[in-house]
């Protein structure tokens, strides 16, 4: 059972890593599209609020692939968080947590 939990945990971490990389790549792509005189924080601020239409309205259609990559990364990351907590609970219930 312990080996199974470790294998599942490794897969969950791999999915989370893929999601994190997609999030960073999307954010960097959006930050590079920032107009001259505008800081990247001003452009990336709507990402924190998950306001994707505001980013596309501000930067145009050039931001669409980066926003899609960011959204896919968020989806992967959230998809990995749920099994991660399930593995923690399963590890505690089976007595392997100590």
Image (cartoon, rainbow, N blue to C red):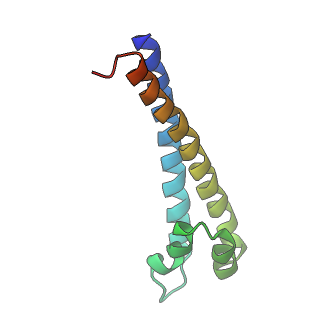
Which image quarter: residue 95?
Answer: top left
Question: What is the x, y in percent for residue 78?
Answer: 56, 45
Q: From what the image shows, is residue 5 above or below residue 20?
A: above
Q: Which quadrant holds the N terminus?
A: top left
Q: How many marks?
A: 0
Which of 26 and 72 lies nearest the eye of the viewer?
A: 72
Q: From what the image shows, is residue 86 above or below residue 54?
A: above
Question: What is the x, y in percent for residue 84?
Answer: 48, 34
Q: Residue furthest left?
A: 98
Residue at the (52%, 67%) spot, across then down: 48
- 54 vs 89, left or right, is right
Residue at the (58%, 40%) spot, across then down: 79
Q: Residue furthest bottom?
A: 37
Q: From what the image shows, is residue 74 above or below residue 34?
A: above
Question: What is the x, y in percent for residue 32?
Answer: 52, 71
- 86 vs 64, left or right, is left
Which of 5 and 86 lies nearest the eye of the viewer?
A: 86
Which of 81 and 60 lies nearest the eye of the viewer?
A: 81
Q: Residue furthest front?
A: 93
Q: From what the image shows, is residue 50 above or below residue 5?
A: below
Q: Which quadrant holds the C terminus?
A: top left
Question: What is the x, y in percent for residue 28?
Answer: 49, 64
Which of 82 and 63 lies nearest the eye of the viewer?
A: 82
Residue at the (54%, 38%) spot, across then down: 82
């Amino acid at each position: 059972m312990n080996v199974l939990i470790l294998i599942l945990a490794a897969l969950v971490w791999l999915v989370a890593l893929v999601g994190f990389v997609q999030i960073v790549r999307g954010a960097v792509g959006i930050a590079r599209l920032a107009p001259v005189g505008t800081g990247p924080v001003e452009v990336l601020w709507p990402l924190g609020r998950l306001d994707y239409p505001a980013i596309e309205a501000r930067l145009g259609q050039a931001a669409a692939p980066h926003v899609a990559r960011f959204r896919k990364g968020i989806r992967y990351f959230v998809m990995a968080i749920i099994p991660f907590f399930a593995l923690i609970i399963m590890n505690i219930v089976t007595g392997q947590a100590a």
